[in-house]
Image: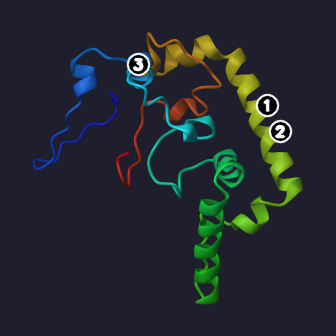
Amino acid sequence: REGHQSKHENYTVKLPFMDDKIDRKGVYDLLDNTGLGVPEYYQWRSRSGCTFCFFQRRIEWIGLMENNPSAWDHAKSLEKQATDNASAFTWIKDMPLTELEKPEMIAKVKEQHKKQIEKLKKNKQKIQQNNPFLKGEDLNIEENLALDDVSSSCLICHK
């Protein structure tokens, strides 16, 4: 993560993989070679961190719903609890998860995501030139679902 830096006097950023010249592919190789493998949630998520990240895209919420129904139900219950206590809380701005889980909304989000991936594939070279975090990376569009998230971290939890 070249982009994750801090100027705070009590905060020191250590990047051991970068210090040892281990890139993204190298990390994946380490995970595979040690028998750990890449975490399953990378099949539908673009980054690790909180299960209920506010910064997830709608397609990632749908991935959570399809791949981890108990976590999905828990996320919905937190929204319901907030509503029951007169708090207008939703994980996605202005859209409760009960709205996102409707079949027509799922189809719409999946279609939008498919179009986005196709557009990104067409612009792959331009994207690599314009994003300093992607220089030299073998860019696999499907693997890196959100290109602007490839080397960024969450501003809240820094994961």
Q: Secondary structure at mark 1?
A: helix
Q: Is residue 110 above or below residue 52?
A: above
Quarter of the picture containing the N terminus is top left
Whether pointer 1 and pointer 2 mark residues with C-beta atoms closer than 8 Å, the reply is: yes
The image's colouring method is rainbow
Q: Residue at x 38, y 24 (%)?
A: 34
In the image, what residue type sits under mark 3? Asn
Whether pointer 3 and pointer 1 mark residues with C-beta atoms closer than 8 Å, the reply is: no
Q: How far, Cα to Cα, is label 3 from label 1?
A: 34 Å
In the image, what residue type sits under mark 2? Glu
Q: Residue at x 57, y 28 (%)?
A: 144
Of the residues tagged 3 and 1, which is closer to the observer?
3
Q: Which dot marks residue 115?
A: 1
Of the image marks 3 and 1, the number of the one nearer the N terminus: 3
Residue 47 in picture, x, y percent from top left: 49, 39
- Is 154 displayed left or right of 147 in the figure? left
In this view, the residue farthest toward the left is 9
Q: Name the residue carrying label 3.
A: 33
In this view, the residue farthest toward the bottom is 85
Q: Name the residue carrying label 2.
A: 111
Q: Is residue 3 above or below residue 140?
A: below
Q: Is residue 118 above or below residue 62?
A: above
Q: How far, Cα to Cα, is label 3 from label 2?
A: 36 Å
